[in-house]
Image: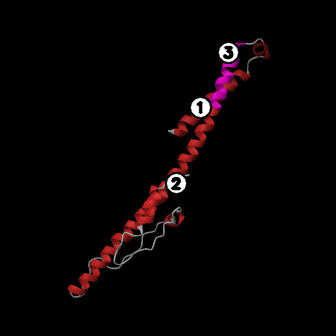
Amino acid sequence: MTRFIVITITAAAIAIAFAFAGHSDAAVSAGDPRVGALQKQVRALQAQVKVLQRRVANDEGQLSLNFEGDTCLGAQVADLIQGTWMVVDQLSVATQAGKTYFGSQQPVDDYKNCADLARPDVPRPGIVVPPTIEPLRPLQQWLHEPLD
């Protein structure tokens, strides 16, 4: 939606500029008040475009960070769940003559997104037995910290 607004304002500014490029110098030098008003509008639209471009760049950065945080969270929750399954298997082996319910577990790929998070750093220890929520604490803090 923001890109649409930027494109629309940019197109309007270009259209206005082209519309006046074809007018004769006589109209401009004669002091046509419409020219001055439209030039003022073009300058205002150009300033708005710059502001919107900065906002779009900021929004895209925020979305990228959000994706990294979500991917890290998903991987850490998968580690926590799999750690729980491993404990269930340990207990069942000990109490049910070697029976297992879940078998071996494989870490979920976080695409190195946990390692990309900083201030605070968000380490990912992998599947831990017994499971603990401690690896989620730095991620929770990272998600809560406002960006500069």
Q: Nearer the viewer, residue 22 or 75?
A: 75
Contact? badges 1 and 3 (CB < 8 Å): no
Residue at (49% x, 59% y) in the render: 68
Q: Is residue 33 visible?
A: yes
Q: At numbered mark 3, what does the secondary structure look like: helix, strand or loop?
A: helix
Magenta stretch mostly in which secondary structure?
helix
Q: Earlier in the sequence, mark 2 or mark 3?
A: 3
Instruction: Give the distance between the C-alpha atoms of the residues marked 2 and 1, in whole angstroms.
Output: 25 Å
Point out the residue furthest to the left here.
96
Looking at the picture, which amino acid does disc 2 mark?
Answer: Ser
Instruction: Give the distance between the C-alpha atoms of the residues marked 1 and 3, in whole angstroms.
Output: 20 Å
Q: At numbered mark 1, what does the secondary structure look like: helix, strand or loop?
A: helix
| Total marks placed | 3
Residue that mark 2 sits on: 64
Residue that mark 3 sits on: 34
- Name the spot of residue 147 as percent of width and height, x first: 53, 52
Residue that mark 1 sits on: 9
Magenta stretch? 32-46
Residue at (66% x, 21% y) in the render: 38
Looking at the picture, which amino acid does disc 1 mark?
Answer: Ile
Q: Nearer the viewer, residue 64 or 16?
A: 64
